[in-house]
Image (cartoon, helix red, strand yellow):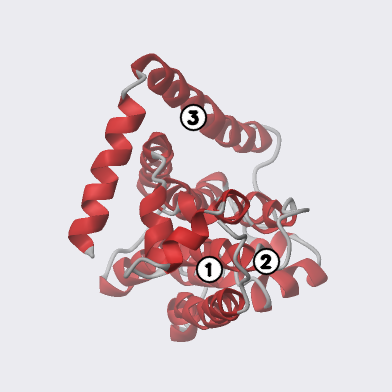
Amino acid sequence: MVKLYIESFKNNIKSQLEYKSSFIMNSISQLFVFFTYYFIIIALFSKFDNIKGYNVYEVLLCFSIIHFGFAFNETFFRGIDKFDDLIIGGDLDRFLVRPQGILFQTLCREIDFIKVFRILQSLIVMVIALINLDIVWNISKVVVLLLMLISSVLIFFGIFVLTASYCFITVQGLEVRNLFTDGGKNLAQYPISIYRKGVVAFFTFIIPYGFINYYPLLYFIDRTDNILYMLSPLLVFVFLIPCLLSFKIGLKHYNSVGS
């Protein structure tokens, strides 16, 4: 399976590089889009010293982690985000008669290599934040940072799968997925405690952004020494269970488009 995915990755890159001018222009546009978010935060902190006690570099760390996970999914899991196209075009019927799993085939279907620049940009912002934060490094700090990055990838993967499951019910009104992907990304790029209690509760216990880059962030910047805060990103695996289960149920009840 790994070999097959690598081969699909190469083919996707080759197809995108066939039109080099378009690839370059799209890459440049990705640079501007990402740094627009970045400069908004910088501009905000030019007027305020902190946001509810969080300085600019703590917010930038929060920002970089959530954007890393989103960019990773848009790069490597783009096919799932466009799952409705499979149903509308009848391609899902062909996937069903192939030996590989549906999710794996969907992953191989489309890889948006241009978005890899957003991954690199988020890592650059993270390095800037880490250099300027007074972090006492040890093994636990390295572990929690890695958990935050991994869980950021997994939560967006789970949301992509969840919205793909919705496509088995209807392919209309899928703007709802933007509420939890783009909307969630923009919300979670700040420490979630700055919002009202209802918003915090929803995006902690329903869509667990709070366990990705808020509670572990408190541990990372030494605002708590509670080990549970350090391990809280692992709860994203619990979130993945209903996401994958809903996809399995939807696939089981899928009716062919007759292709």
Q: Is residue 184 left or right of residue 127?
A: right
Front tag of 3 and 1: 1
Q: Amino acid at mark 1?
A: Gly
Q: Residue at x 53, y 49 (%)?
A: 63
Q: Residue at x 56, y 45 (%)?
A: 56
Is residue 205 at least partly visible in the picture?
Answer: yes
The percent coordinates of residue 59 (x first, y second) are: 56, 50
Look at mark 2 in the image and give the residue it sits on: 166
Name the N-terminal-most of marks 2 and 1: 1
Q: CA distance from mark 3 to mark 1?
A: 24 Å
Name the N-terminal-most of marks 3 and 2: 3
The N terminus is located in which quarter? bottom left
Disc 3 on helix, strand or loop? helix
Look at mark 3 in the image and give the residue it sits on: 30
Q: Residue at x 47, y 49 (%)?
A: 78
Q: Is residue 179 left or right of residue 19?
A: right
Where residue 148 is drawn, which disc sits there? none
Front tag of 3 and 2: 2
Disc 2 on helix, strand or loop? helix
Does residue 12 lie above or below 214 as drawn?
Answer: above
Does residue 66 lie above or below 38 as drawn?
Answer: below
Name the N-terminal-most of marks 3 and 1: 3
The percent coordinates of residue 58 (x first, y second) are: 52, 53
Q: Amino acid at mark 3?
A: Gln
**Dot 1, crowdedness within 10 Å: few (<14), some or many (≥20)?**
many
The percent coordinates of residue 229 (x first, y second) are: 50, 79
Does residue 226 lie above or below 40 as drawn?
Answer: below
Q: Residue at x 73, y 62 (%)?
A: 170
Between 225 and 69, the residue placed more toward the observer is 69
Q: CA distance from mark 3 to mark 2?
A: 28 Å
Where residue 158 is drawn, which disc sits there? 1
